[in-house]
Image: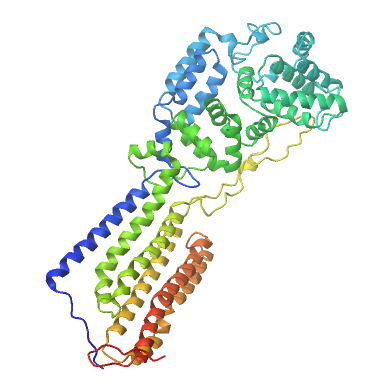
Amino acid sequence: MPYHVLPPPDSGTAGKPVATALALVVGGMIVLAGAWTLPVNLKSVNPALLHAAGRGTPSLADFGVQLVESEKPGPAALVLAAAQKVDDPGSGRLAAALTAFASRQQDYVAWGGWDPFLDPIFNLKENAGHTASTPVLAFFITGHARDALRRYLANSRSPGVQTVLQTRGVTGTMHFVPATAAGGQPLDAVILLTALLYQGDHLSPPLQRAVKRLADEAVRTREMGELEFFYLDVLALGRRLNWIQLCELLRITDDTKTVGEYAHLAQVAPDQLPLLYAAALFTRSADSVAGYLLQYGKAGATDLRFALALRQGAVQQLLLRQVPVNHGLAAPMDFAGAFALLHPRLTLLAKYLGYFLGAFLILRGLDRWWLSPLRRAARDIAESRVLPRMQSGVMALLIAFVIIITTEPFLLRAAPPSEYRVRVVIPLLANVATPPAAAGANARPTTSMDTSTIVSIGVFALLQVAVYLICLVKIGEITRQNMPPLLKLRLMENEENLFDSGLYIGMMGTATALVLQVLNVIEPNLLAAYSSNLFGIVCVAFVKIRHVRGCKRRLILAAQTPAVPGGQPAPIAS
């Protein structure tokens, strides 16, 4: 039986496939680069997106100047502190505006601004020597101030105010000394402060309803219950904020839970208080700011500072998404950020499709360049025209998956516990002194993927691609030899160890990665270790199922089919 080897392609026609292959490879690289620069991520936000969101919106300094012009120097002072922390270029202008206001209205500085509800109670022009911003409880704790507040609020026609005042007679407390007992001045001052906030509509409507419900329950049961925790939170904030600062914060706070979160954050992270306060007023959403910091801890505070430096729109976008900032990506062109803001899901889909398309084009180009001459020598020409596209598509999916998990550092990792997670604080007689800094002393582990992890995954993937190509070359070498099919089948069986080598290399890669992680040579990450095994399994599956099995099937059929004159095989007998 004669065996024929196809002649090599003509040198005049060989240049065109090579040029096409190079064009496919270059095009794939361009598509991959374009997809990589799209500023959208699945579980994080790209800095370029925040830049685009903040463009043209007010800065912290602009917002602070607006507060000064609204005669609210207290909130403006905290905004100035936040602006200085983020190196806002307009900080000097805001500081000058505050200085000018203080020189004109020195009497209002201690209270943080002017409020008509304070005029009947306190003479704002006589602040007992207070010339700087003063926590509101420093005024309300004195007996003279509490007597004046009680006389004023006793005439209130608000049922809510009267219910809050009735809680002064509740003696069932856990952490406070009852307001009417000796040593009950702190609770008395907090109750009067809460009633005045209620009277002046300084509580947001949802928060006002919640306080009224808790006060009704406390009066009915003669036990403070949950209301006592709210009073503790107001006490903690009242010892740190002046009157106008406290009013502005509670006006944008929707529930007592958020008040507790701000009181907790003010104690465990006092250095972050200006940033928290400025972000809450900047976005008119205290709830989302507190939730973000409690979820992501110190890393969240860093991301919030980053967004504050990029103006109001950036902060709103960060808090709307409630995800960390991915600082490891390059900034794209301006139009990409604007488009991603308008169509985030469409941009994310385009990015992932770009990864797949770019990998597919590169694989098709390499296939045409290196492997097509080997396949043209195979006997089954019809099958070889369809099979490469299927193989390139599956490999492109695998490569796209690897790119996605390496460029999405927050995709497979759960967020570590936050340093600012709420803890129960039980003060002694309402002594809510700031707890030691140990509550947030431990640095938060980074949630971004380490460079060594990315390199490990890339090396393991490249090793399996090399094994895959070596196996294809060996299969092509055996099928091109001029020998009987049974002998070729024996040679294929002899190469079983080579075809299984992907598994061996995968297991060795996993073992090596685990040893290096134990020795602290690379960042501890199980994803990097077990990705080697995963790539090995996928490689061997492709080789043995898609290639070896098909090649053996053709050789078995060829061995069982007798040759007839003319080189055509005779029909197989049934």
In the rendered image, which quarter is residue 3 located in?
Answer: bottom left
Would residue 137 appear left or right of 94 to someone viewing this image? right
In the rendered image, which quarter is residue 154 located in?
Answer: top right
Residue 202 percent location from the top left of the image? 65, 18
Image height of 18 relative to 123, above or below? below
Image height of 469 relative to 57, above or below? below
Q: Residue at x 58, y 34 (%)?
A: 288
Q: Residue at x 53, y 62 (%)?
A: 526
Residue 107 percent location from the top left of the image? 59, 9
- The answer, for residue 455, to whether it is visible in the render is no
Camera-side residue of 127 and 381: 381
Quadrant into which the C terminus falls: bottom left
Q: Residue at x 45, y 21 (%)?
A: 62
Would residue 156 appear left or right of 440 to someone viewing this image? right
Camera-side residue of 389 and 88: 389
In the rendered image, which quarter is residue 198 located in?
Answer: top right
Residue 307 percent location from the top left of the image? 47, 35
Image height of 477 relative to 281, above or below? below
Camera-side residue of 450 and 475: 475
